[in-house]
Each structure stands twice: as C-alpha cells, then as structure tokens.
C-alpha cells in the first residue's frame, strides 16, 4: 500500500514553522559567499527589521493602554456603581461583580485598587472583597482573547493563538472552582493573609512603589491622546457624590476665597394693637392713621460671606481634553481607534517576524525558548520560565501586556503552549507583587487592609499554581485550552461566542440570580452544575474507559445533532452571513487546510484500487493520520487503515 499526499497538513504540534519564506540550505551557503557590500546591506536590513519590530511592539502596547482608557470611559462609572451594590454579601455576586467590572475597565489593577479603597473606607469588609479580587483575576484574561482574534484568518495559527490566550483563563477559572468553596467554608485566604500581616509589624509608608518602567515610556503618548480621572470611579464606588467626568479635562485648578454679598427680603405683618411693641415698630404704628391695626411691611437686608470656589485655570494637554465631548463619545472613539491600531500593529508584527525568523534562525530561537534543561534538571525548566514571567511582569507592571505579547508568538509557533503556561502563571504572581509594593506606600490604617488584600491575591495565585502545575497530570488548563483551540479552528465564530458567553452572559445570569437569593440560585444553578459534571464524567469515560459505559452512552450519537455538535449552529451562521467574499475565503481556507490522498490497494494480484479522499482540517490536526475514508457511493463509506 502506498499513499501520496499533496496540499498542506496541520499537525497538533504547538511549535511549527513560521511562514513559507524560510531560507533554504542553499541560501544559507550563499550567504557565506556574500561580498562585503552585500553583508553590510544584509546587516542593515536586519537592523531595520528589528527596529521596525520594536516600533510595532511599542504601538501594540500603546493600543492596549488606549483600549483600557476607552473601556474606562465607557464603563468606568458603571463599574464603580457595581462595586457599590448592596448584594456583595453574596460571595458569587461579589465574584461576578469583580469579573464584570474588570471586563468594563480592562484592568485588574484598577478594579483591585477600587476594592482596596472601599475596604480602607470601611464600605465593604475585607472578607467580601476577597471574592471581588477572585473575579478580577478572571476578568483580566479577556485581553488575551481579544488579541488572539487578530490571527483569525489562518486556522492553524488561530488555533495556537486562541489556545495560548485561553490557558490563562482556564487556570483562573479552575483556581476559582477550587478556592471559592474553600474561602466560603473556612475563609482560607483571609485567614492566611491575616496571619502574615499580623506578623509583619507594618508601618505607614514603610515601602516604595514598584518601578513603573513600561508606563514611563508609554504614558506620555497615551496622555497626549487622553487622560483618565480614576478618582471619579473610586468616588462612585464609595458612594460619594461624584459629578465630574471620567475624562480628565482640567489639569490645573485653584481654590479661591470669594466674597459674596447676598440681598435678602421678606414680608412681615405688624399688629399695631399689640401693646408689647416698642422701638421703631411702635413709632411706625403711631404715625399711621388711627383705625389701622395691621401693617404689612417688606424687610430687606444684606449679608456678606466668604466661600471657597474652584477655578479651572488650564486644560490638560491631551487631544480629547481640548474638546467638549462627553465620556461616552470619547470612549467609543478611543475604543474603535485602539482596536484598529491593535490589529494593525499585530499584523505588522506577524509580517516582520515571518521575515526575520526564517531558516536556521527559527530553529535556534525555538530550541532556545522551548528547550528543557538537560538530564534530571529538565523538571525545573518550567519553574525558570515561571520566574521569567514574574520578573518581566514586575518590570513592565502589567500582566495583560506581557501575556498579550506572548499570544501572537504562540500563534506563530515561536513559543509553545507548554512554555507559555508557566510564564503566564509567573505573570499572575508578578502583578500581585506590584500590588504589594503599592500597599506598602499606603498611609495610616489603610496599609494593613491594603496589604491583606494584596496578599489574598498573591495566595490565590500561589495556591492555584501549587495545585495545577507541579504534577504534570494536573496541568488541566493546558488540556482545556487545547480543546477550545481545536473547536475555534473548526468554528472560528466560536471565539466571539466564547467571549460573550464567558465574560458577559454567564456572569450576568449568576449575578441576577444572586440578587434574587440563594434559593433561586440553587434551584437554577444546581441542576445545571450537576448536568455539567455528569457530562464531563461521561466524556472522560468515553475516551479512557468506554467499556464501563452502556453501549448507548459510548457516543453521543443517540442525541439530536444540535446537542452534541456545533455544525447546525455553524450552518445557521453561514446562511445568515453569506457573502461572495466570505464564501470564497471559506473555500480557500478549507482548501489550504485539506489533505488530498491517493490510496492504492492491491488485492490478490488484481489491478490496484485507487481512492481519493480529502481529510478535513479537523483530522489534519492529528499528529498521525490514522485512517483514510474513501467515498464508494453517495451513501456508502469505506475506511482503509494505513
């Protein structure tokens, strides 16, 4: 038997070749024979590409900062009101508020700082704030998924990018599944952080802020476009009468004492028959003709007072501060503009990397990034990657920027998902250490509460890492992320659906049921969770131990197609959004990700039987092709083993 293949084949490997412009062996040998001028030209071209890459990366980071500002302008006050909600006594409601608020402001640092402010002001107790911090941890991972959408055009690249983006999300969700019940039952995080804070002997202002290197180079550009007044969001959260705009318009103002003179007047009735009248009123009544007993007078007097008045002196030196647009208008403009800028920067980054990383250069970089230490030290490679992620996040002070920069690298195959996972976990720790530095700079009684919240965040991530990283078998976030990646490579609309479902619909439903009460939440959520657990167990048994199941439950074929496949939904979406360009793009993508094979089978010396088949992109992702299906007739299928 022999098989001939043509077309492209996407394997399940996380690290694949980048682009088709790699240098051949011949090209590498010719480079050694270059003249001096050619070598100088080659070096200058590579330097230019490197500088272009750094410039595009800088624009990419700025676009993330603008994206955060846009979300704060659109949803900042809403997020503040959510924190001020009266249902925070419900742990699940607090969790969902933290998630939704972080999605609205696109910054876990902002939402966490609001929580610290509210705890320090005794608006909410620390035990309830822990659940909000958990939700903020989940909400911050949406940035990675938005970034991965920029690589949606190529199925295999998008599969890897979406897998890399959701590994952060899966870790946070699994950590919440484990630690939320534990915190509700025994207050694990509050108790542990309290013990540590009590042993520290903290003093107000005993620490300094963490170095803010990234903002030092990006903040001037962002501030030249828009400036945000985060104090307004905090005032809304604290239920303070905040009437200002989130958009910062005036940067220089002065409080002046202003003298005011106010004229008062009032109507007064005088009874002239009253014998107790004296002074000017008695004299007035005596001058009036006899017989008049009541006199109506208008009394007038002036008062002077000194009031403090804020006078705006100078507008902020930013583009939108010079306009009179409201928060919503500016937020919409910045949100759309930052998304377009982000897509453009990512497109250029991918193109430049495809050009730079070619041939043996690619192999060297991949080998360096994804290689393990030799011998018995191989196990500790991931922990070094974890420390790298922690250190880089401490330097740039943003886990979203760090992990969002890694996402396109995973899509291109430069970094494997298995390597990104520990770096993401390290980034989670790095962003909490930044909060610890910030807590040390607090004043008064706030330092203890701020430190305890920061430590709750730290222990949340450390405990999650201790569960889902040291034992390779328990690295479930990688497995779940790869499952999501395969689904999105086949149904690319699923990525949008996932964002809406995971970060909007489910949190909104849980929050609404939490407001209604535990009875409604249990009556609706209990059966749903139970059904989900049963489905997961059956799926595991179908793959691992199918003999333990009844024959009918070994597959889901007995259910309607819509209950175990996304194909019907895919067909509906295809019909709803049908256009000539989309159809052509789909056909081109399917052709690029198909594998056409010719199979020759000789039977007892007879002439070979030739079959042709096309293996879909779903099968082409398997590391080894297990079988080829040949069409014999319209309704008859035969499978031939290779």
Image (spheres, rainbow, N blue to C red):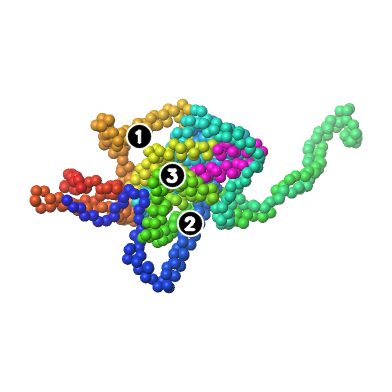
The residue positioned 49% from the left and 28% from the top of the image is: 185
In the rendered structure, the answer to whether residue 554 lies left or right of residue 262 reads left
Decide if residue 534 is in sight here: yes
The answer to whether mark 2 and mark 1 are in CB contact below 8 A is: no
- In the image, 291 versus 328, the foreground residue is 328
Camera-nearest residue between 540 and 560: 540
The residue that label 3 is drawn on is: 380
Marks 2/1: CA distance? 40 Å
Left or right, 57 with respect to 590, comes to right
Circle 3 Cα neighbour tier, 10 Å, few/some/many (<14 / 14–19 / ≥20) = few
Dot 3: element: helix
Residue 611 % position (x, y): 17, 51
Disc number for residue 189 = none
On the image, which quarter does residue 447 sit in? top right
- Residue 198 image-quadrant placement: top right
In this picture, which residue range is highlighted in magenta?
428-455
Coordinates of residue 353 in the picture (x, y in percent): 42, 58
The residue pinned by badge 1 equals 536
Q: Residue at x 49, y 39 (%)?
A: 461
The residue singled out by tag 2 in the image is 57
Query: Mark 2 falls on what kind of element?
Result: helix
Examine the rendered structure and indicate whether residue 55 appears above or below residue 146.
below
The 10 Å Cα crowd at callout 2, few under 14, some 14 to 19, many 20 or more, is: some
Residue furthest toward the left?
605
The answer to whether residue 70 of the structure is visible from this angle is no
Closer to the observer: label 2 or label 3? 3
- Is the C-beta separation of discs 2 and 3 under 8 Å? no
Mark 2–mark 3 distance (CA, rounded to whole Å): 30 Å
**Residue 618 shown in magenta:** no
């Amino acid at each position: 038997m022999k098989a001939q293949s043509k077309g492209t084949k996407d394997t399940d490997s996380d690290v694949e070749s980048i682009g088709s412009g790699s240098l051949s062996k011949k090209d590498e040998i010719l480079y050694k024979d270059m003249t001096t001028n050619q070598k100088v030209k080659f070096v200058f071209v590579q330097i230019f590409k490197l500088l272009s890459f750094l410039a595009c990366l800088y624009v990419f980071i700025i676009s993330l900062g603008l994206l955060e500002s846009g979300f704060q302008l659109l949803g900042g006050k809403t997020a503040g009101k959510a924190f001020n909600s009266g249902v925070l006594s419900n742990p699940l409601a607090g969790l969902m508020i933290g998630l939704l608020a972080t999605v609205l402001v696109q910054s876990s640092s902002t939402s966490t700082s609001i929580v610290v402010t509210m705890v320090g002001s005794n608006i909410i107790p620390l035990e309830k704030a822990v659940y909000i911090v958990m939700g903020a941890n989940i909400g911050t991972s949406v940035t990675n998924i938005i970034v991965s959408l920029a690589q949606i055009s190529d199925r295999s690249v998008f599969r890897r990018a979406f897998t890399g983006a959701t590994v952060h999300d899966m870790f946070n969700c699994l950590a919440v599944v484990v630690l939320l019940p534990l915190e509700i039952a025994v207050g694990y995080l509050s108790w542990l952080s309290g013990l540590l804070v009590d042993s520290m002997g903290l003093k107000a202002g005993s620490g300094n802020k963490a170095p803010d290197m990234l903002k030092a180079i990006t903040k001037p550009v962002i501030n030249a476009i828009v400036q945000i007044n985060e104090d307004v969001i905090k005032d809304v959260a604290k239920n303070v009468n905040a009437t200002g705009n989130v958009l910062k318009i005036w940067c220089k103002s002065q409080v002046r004492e202003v003298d005011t003179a106010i004229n008062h007047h009032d109507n007064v009735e005088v009874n002239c028959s009253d014998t107790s009248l004296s002074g000017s009123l008695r004299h007035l009544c005596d001058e009036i003709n006899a017989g008049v007993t009541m006199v109506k007078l208008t009394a007038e007097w002036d008062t002077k007072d000194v009031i403090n008045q804020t006078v705006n002196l100078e507008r902020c030196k930013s583009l939108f501060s010079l306009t009179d647009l409201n928060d919503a208008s500016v937020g919409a403009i910045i949100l759309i503009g930052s998304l377009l800028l982000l897509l453009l920067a990512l497109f250029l980054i991918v193109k430049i990397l495809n050009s730079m990383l070619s041939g043996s250069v690619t192999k060297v970089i991949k080998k360096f990034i994804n290689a393990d230490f030799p011998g018995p030290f191989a196990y500790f490679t991931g922990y070094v990657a974890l420390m790298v992620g922690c250190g880089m996040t401490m330097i740039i002070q943003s886990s979203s920027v760090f992990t969002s920069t890694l996402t396109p690298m995973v899509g291109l195959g430069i970094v494997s998902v298995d390597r990104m996972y520990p770096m993401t976990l390290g980034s989670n720790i790095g962003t909490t250490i930044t909060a610890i530095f910030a807590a040390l700079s607090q004043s008064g009684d706030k330092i203890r509460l701020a430190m305890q919240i920061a430590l709750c965040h730290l222990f949340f991530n450390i405990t999650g890492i201790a569960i889902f990283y040291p034992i390779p078998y328990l690295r479930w976030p990688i497995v779940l992320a790869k499952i999501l990646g395969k689904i999105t490579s086949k149904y690319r609309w699923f990525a949008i659906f996932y964002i809406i479902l995971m970060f909007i619909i489910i949190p909104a439903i849980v929050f609404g049921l939490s407001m209604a009460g535990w009875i409604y939440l249990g009556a609706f959520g209990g059966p749903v969770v139970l059904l989900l657990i049963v489905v997961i167990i059956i799926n595991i048994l179908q793959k691992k131990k199918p003999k333990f199941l009844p024959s009918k439950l070994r597959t889901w074929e007995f259910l309607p197609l819509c209950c175990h496949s996304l194909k019907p939904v895919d067909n509906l979406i295809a019909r709803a959004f049908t256009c000539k360009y989309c159809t052509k793009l789909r056909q081109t993508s399917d052709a690029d990700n198909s594998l056409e094979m010719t199979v020759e089978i000789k039977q007892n010396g007879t002439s070979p039987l030739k079959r042709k088949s096309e293996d879909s992109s779903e099968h082409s992702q398997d590391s080894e092709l297990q079988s080829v299906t040949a069409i014999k007739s319209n309704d008859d299928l035969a499978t031939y083993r290779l």
